[in-house]
Amino acid sequence: MSAEQISRSTPEPADVVGCVPCDMMRGRVPLPGGQIHETPGWLVMHVLGTFGLGALAVVPRRHVVHVADLNEEEAAGLGGLLTETAAAVTALTDPAQVYTCQWSHTNGEAAHIHFILQPIRRSDMERHPGKLGPVLQSAMFTAENKPGLAEVETFAELARAAFAQRAGAVSPPLAGGPSGADGE
């Protein structure tokens, strides 16, 4: 049985006003650090919130709320992009591990899927002894672990350079600069 056959019967719209990832990708709300990397089906951005500096999100450009609803192109591109993103996070943060997880709930409802690649540093484990995996992530959520805008923008520039270096070419800057606020 193909992914299309087992996919949910209602196709997702390409864009949903009021969906935070859709709104950020379309320039309706600010995207701290701007778009870091893109493929035809996916966008990489810095995570908002308390995942810490260097946590990146891999987000489908199309509004998708279930992994089973990814189209063939999106599904085929995901593995390589997760690997590339983990390599960029590793190169820039020197973590003990890069946690990779998928989050997609808002107020208890399925929401735009996104994959988080979070660097876990030795210092994170030392601040929360004996806690690993989701328990460590949970402990970090309650800590003041949210980076400032300037830190995010600086990290995003470094991450863009890391992706470009892996691709073997320097990418041109995105229109609107690091904030991506002009909708590009």
Image (cartoon, rainbow, N blue to C red):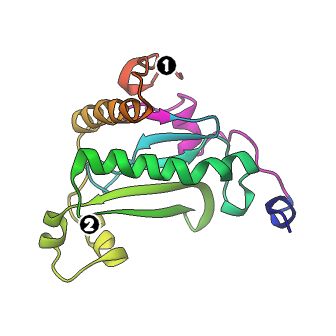
Is residue 24 highlighted in magenta? yes
Query: Most prominent secondary structure in the magenta stretch?
Result: loop
**Which residue is denoted by mark 1 in the rendering?**
182
Separation of marks 2 and 1 at Cα, in angstroms: 32 Å
Query: Where residue 41 sits: x, y (%)?
Result: 64, 40
| Picture residue at 36% right of the left edge, 25% below the top | 178
**Residue 14 vs residue 40, the one in the foreground:** 40
The quadrant holding residue 128 is bottom left
Q: Residue furthest front?
A: 168
Query: Where residue 163 sits: x, y (%)?
Result: 40, 35
Q: Secondary structure at mark 1?
A: loop
Image quadrant holding the N terminus, namely bottom right
In magenta, the rendered stretch is 10-37
Q: Is residue 181 above or below residue 101?
A: above
The amino acid on which the numbered mark 2 sits, given as a three-letter code, is: Met
Query: Where residue 122 sits: x, y (%)?
Result: 16, 66
**Residue 71 vs residue 26, the one in the foreground:** 71
Q: Residue 117 vs residue 125: left or right?
A: right
**Residue 56 vs residue 79, the one in the foreground:** 79
Is residue 68 highlighted in magenta? no
Q: Secondary structure at mark 2?
A: helix
User: Which numbered tag is attached to residue 78?
Assistant: none
Q: Earlier in the sequence, mark 2 or mark 1?
A: 2
Q: Is residue 174 above or below residue 76?
A: above
**Which residue is denoted by mark 2 in the rendering?**
140
| Picture residue at 62% right of the left edge, 47% below the top | 77
Few, some or many C-alpha atoms within 10 Å of disc 2 (few <14, some 14-19, many ≥20)?
Answer: some
Q: Is residue 136 above or below residue 143?
A: below
The amino acid on which the numbered mark 1 sits, given as a three-letter code, is: Asp
| Picture residue at 67% right of the left edge, 53% below the top | 75
